Amino acid sequence: MFDALSGKLGDVFDRLRRRGALSETDVIEAMRDIRLALLEADVALPVVRDFISKVRLQAVGTEVLRAVSPGQQVVKIVNDALVEALGGEGVVPLNLNAAAPIPFLMVGLQGSGKTTTSGKIALYLKDKQRKKVLLASLDTQRPAAQLQLAQLAERAGVASLPIIAGETPVQIARRAMDTGRREVFDVVILDTAGRLSIDEALMDEVKAIRAATDPAETLLVVDAMTGQDAVATATAFNEAVSITGIVMTRLDGDARGGAALSMRAITGAPIKLMGMGEKLDALEQFHPERIASRILGMGDIVSLVEKASENVDQANAEKLAKKMAKGKFDLEDYGEQLKQITKMGSLSGIMGMLPGVGKIKQQLADADLDTSILKRQGAIISSMTKAERANPDIMKASRKKRVAAGSGTSVQEVNRLLKQFDMMKDMMKRASKLGQKGLARGGLGALMPQGGGRRPF
Amino acid sequence: MALGFFSRLKAGLTRSTTKLTTGITDTFTKRKLDDFALEELEELLIAADLGPTVAAKVIRAFRRARFGQDVSPPEIRAALADEIAKILAPVAQPLTIDETKQPFVILMVGVNGTGKTTTIGKLAQIYADAGQKPMLVAGDTFRAAAVEQLQIWGNRAHAPVVIGAQDADPAGLAFDAMTRAEREGAKILLIDTAGRLHNKAALMEELRKIIRVIKKRDPTAPHAILLTLDATTGQNALTQVKTFKDMVDLTGLIVTKLDGSARAGVVVALAESTGLPIHAVGVGEQAADLRPFDATEFARALTGADPV
């Protein structure tokens, strides 16, 4: 989602890294680039200004200029400032510390994803927190909105308030809370109609709903693609109904997500959750520090590690790592790795989490890589004999023909795999030279063949 | 009607206009147009979602014409409106219905929550009032209650709505609808589709399939492929429109929710980068709130300049 921004900032930092020491002019120049990158990413102007002045103040100090690695220092300062702007460290959970039934109020502009998010939160509370949830739609504006929530409730396996035509939103809210008390629900989610922040009548209505229900959470649902207006919207809703949290939706899109950066800085309300897809379970907690490092092109290492530990056989991985270190990595191991990667999901998803990959990702997208290639490569490796896997150099024309026929691929594809494998071995040699520390610092970018154009694997 | 549109639009744009014009007034009341002032002006344009590229272009034009002059805020607004109108003029084109095509097939596409179904509902009403016998197709078989939402609009417009089962193949549904439209003599066929993020390859492929299947029935159809663009969208709109254009040959845009906020600026950036016609803008929830797009009025409303 933050690819473009990551790429931009990656360029800036590349330039900084190449220098041994930074002059004040260098820092100022870098800040100009960062400012533009943030603006292009739809970060709100006041937030950008504030951000830049903070970072510049720290970066121009002598501490930085005399530091051993000024580039690293600036990266750290920018990263820290980004994390702070995104909401400090750590996850802010939904507030469930209230007397049941706990009212949640969902507000936002039209089409920001309130109703879908309501369904997602209901499912999350039901499955992860074991709460009994009641969904109630107060949207009497948009045709069939109430029906939409009822259908989502059914899919999520939670209850929804029976629809009574002709009721006002406030009446529905009261009835929802009554039902919640009578039928002993833990949480009542009140989904409101989308409204414009400048529509006074509708803003008054949502104020009345809030007054009538006193919600434990008032969540503002914001589309991640939102431009500069995110701030105006958040400010208006915050003034009217005191937002307690923000939900960013459609973060599975490719929006640069500057709105995320602006939100907390302007409203003070934390971003609590993010929508990552159309399915009801595609809701994740918001991790400011992860997003910040993604913006910087430093990769979402935490996410990657978590995802990997869920899916990768630990013993296997260690064995592999040892082999890699010794330079004894063969096609057998590569085949094993392919299997694990396919288990972890889409390639671009994984690559997006790796450090330094922001720039390469575009190339990856252009190359239209998908896991089906991995499956084909897996098939090719499966069609080889053990001897061939251990020592790919013995693969000559007739062996290639046999393997191609056996795997349902072509000799060209077999060749391509062998060539890629060669390149990989080359990369691993470089990796072991860099060592663990070098890898963490330089990121994956340090491993990539310079000049681009070639496929990384 | 023209003035009505303008005042409606201007009312809708008040927020952005106020912000922008206050900024301009602050910036220029007591000084010359120097580098510093130009930089601030550029930021003001960016804050209105014009995007850095377009903002820079406008500023370059300003620099050539006005650098070092004493300028008043009204002059700035008028000149800014002129610059923006120049960029928008070529794309302000109404959607014309070719009556030799029967039915004239309009496919509505776009990202989730941008207002596809609502816009189809409005179009249906407008065409029905003009006696052009629209027929609607509830092609969003994915989102909960999307079909019912379109049916309500169909009832309002007294237009038939073709529906399929939940999660039915939208391409098959479109094909059936083509057949039915021909049989029943509908003049305009409005096909709704599920919202999709442009970076989801599988969903974009699904859209291409819908078009392929429509072409089996009529090789010249769909006669218009319209993308609804939420006016609150920031610079991502550029990627959004470009990807849809590359994947499905968009023929035009409809900008929705323009009554609420400052986010009109992205329209300028879009005109600049894609050149796609902007057929209409949505400035409210009623059918009558779908209005033709007028470059000059839009630009003047955006910058807070007085109407011509």
Image: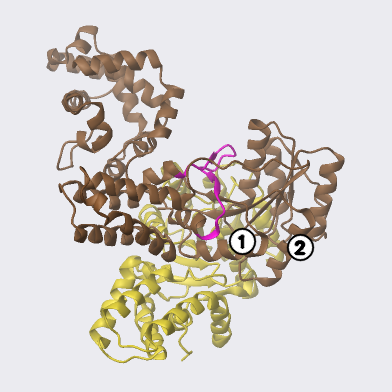
Chain colours: A brown, B yellow
Question: Residue A139: image x %, image y %?
Answer: 71, 57
| Parent chain of label 2 | A
Residue that badge 1 annotates: A238
| Parent chain of label 1 | A
Secondary structure under the numbered disc 2 in the rendered image: helix
Is residue A387 or residue A441 the one in the foreground?
Answer: A441
Q: Do tags 1 and 2 sit on the same chain?
A: yes
Q: Is residue B6 magenta?
A: no
Query: Could one spot residue B111 in this view of the protein?
Result: yes
Q: Residue at x 79, y 38 (%)?
A: A185
Question: Residue A91: image x %, image y %?
Answer: 53, 40
- Residue A208 badge: 2
Pointer 1 local density, CA inside 10 Å: few below 14, some 14–19, many at least 20: many
Q: Is residue A284 magenta?
A: yes
Of the residues under marks 1 and 2, which one precedes in the sequence?
2
**Quarter of the figure with residue B178:** bottom right
Label count reads 2
Pointer 2 local density, CA inside 10 Å: few below 14, some 14–19, many at least 20: some
The magenta span reads A266-288
- Residue A154 badge: none
**Quarter of the figure with residue B49:** bottom left
**Quarter of the figure with residue A356:** top left
Is residue A101 or residue B60 the one in the foreground?
Answer: A101
Secondary structure under the numbered disc 1 in the rendered image: helix
Is residue B148 or residue A155 the one in the foreground?
Answer: A155
Question: Residue A194: image x %, image y %?
Answer: 64, 60
As shown in the figure, which amino acid type bears the numbered disc 1?
Asn
Question: Residue A61: image x %, image y %?
Answer: 27, 55
Q: Residue at x 53, y 39 (%)?
A: A284
Tell me: residue A419, above or below residue A17: above
Mark 1 and mark 2: Cα distance apart in space: 15 Å
